[in-house]
Image (tube, rainbow, N blue to C red):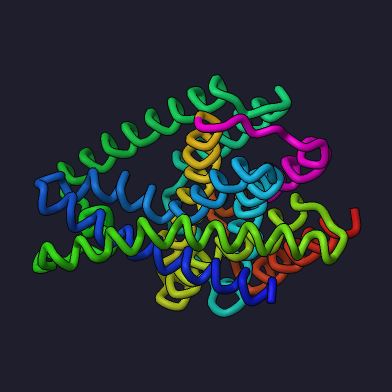
Amino acid sequence: MEWAFACLGLGILLLAGDSLVRGAVNLALRLGIPALIVSLTIVAFGTSAPELLISIQAVFKGVPGIAMGNVIGSNTANILLVLGFPAILAVLHTSGCETRKSYVQMIVATLAFIALAFRGTFDLISGVILLSMLVYMLVDAVRDARAHRKEGRDSELEEPEGADPDMPWWKICVFLVLGLIGLPLGADLLIDAAEVIARDFGVSETAIGLTLVALGTSLPELATTTMAALRRQADVALGNVIGSNMFNLLAIIGVTSILHPIPVATEFLTMDLWVMLGASLLLVPFVFFKQDINRVWGAALTLLYVLYVVGVFIF
């Protein structure tokens, strides 16, 4: 039954997150907020809402390992599995992508996150630092997008996800209500089930957060990247992963640590943070040296993720 409740909670989370994004995007557009700002803020935060609710619920329920494991495990899965598995189906032509700046920002965010983790606890100070970095990166992204538009280059940010100019007010309200009710409900179900599963299998909540919860919350990114690979949209796939990883580190842990301190377990400091950093550095050839993520690379990345998951339970 615990597995059923975990799947139910995850399903509710994903549907509620999508509902909240649709409602918030169209509400913002109706209120006259520019589409560019909507894409860079509301859509980005909305798609991270499931992870955020899981982290907040986890720390308040006394299982911070799930909160930290969710973020660290999701970032590792995003690179090794979310980029690896789609590349097995269709080569990701990352050689033509211009993602150097955003990738460097992701590495800086990762290093800052690791440095703060060695303080032993993500507290108010850590939260302020992470959110300040997030604000800077968002402002920088808005500046770049506006510059591209002035140069006559189209940006995918001009069409926010879920935008529907003709959506009636009642429908917007329904989407918002479903999202706001479903997110805490789904997070509560998933965390309670994860605790029981961890006890039944004799493993830590940290291991469950790094694997079951992290993999579940990475499913939307996996679906998006798979479709982008099949459509030969490597820039969308790579950009999706880089953006998701930055938001996981800066927004989710930043907000959660302001609401409640998050103690950092020793296993994160000795293994998982370094695996996350190592996985991030594996992208260097594809970002800086114009290499494609071909099927061989895809298989290698996917295999590394499988080995990592096995290692989490063994060690």
Please tell me which residue is depicted at 48% across the width and 60% down the height of the picture: 185
* Residue 276 among magenta residues: yes
Image: magenta residue range: 259-279
- Relative to 92, 235 lies left or right: left
Q: Is residue 160 above or below residue 151?
A: below
Q: Quadrant of residue 86?
A: bottom right
Please tell me which residue is depicted at 74% across the width and 62% down the height of the picture: 196
| Near-viewer residue (69 or 9) | 9
- Relative to 37, 110 lies left or right: right
Give percent across and percent down for residue 311: 85, 58
| Near-viewer residue (124 or 61) | 61
| Near-viewer residue (158 or 58) | 58
Please tell me which residue is depicted at 46% across the width and 62% down the height of the picture: 237
Given the current orientation, which residue lies at the most extreme top position? 125
- Relative to 109, 202 lies left or right: right
Please tell me which residue is depicted at 43% across the width and 70% down the height of the picture: 228
Q: Is residue 175 above or below residue 76?
A: below
* Residue 271 among magenta residues: yes
Give percent across and percent down for residue 22: 27, 62
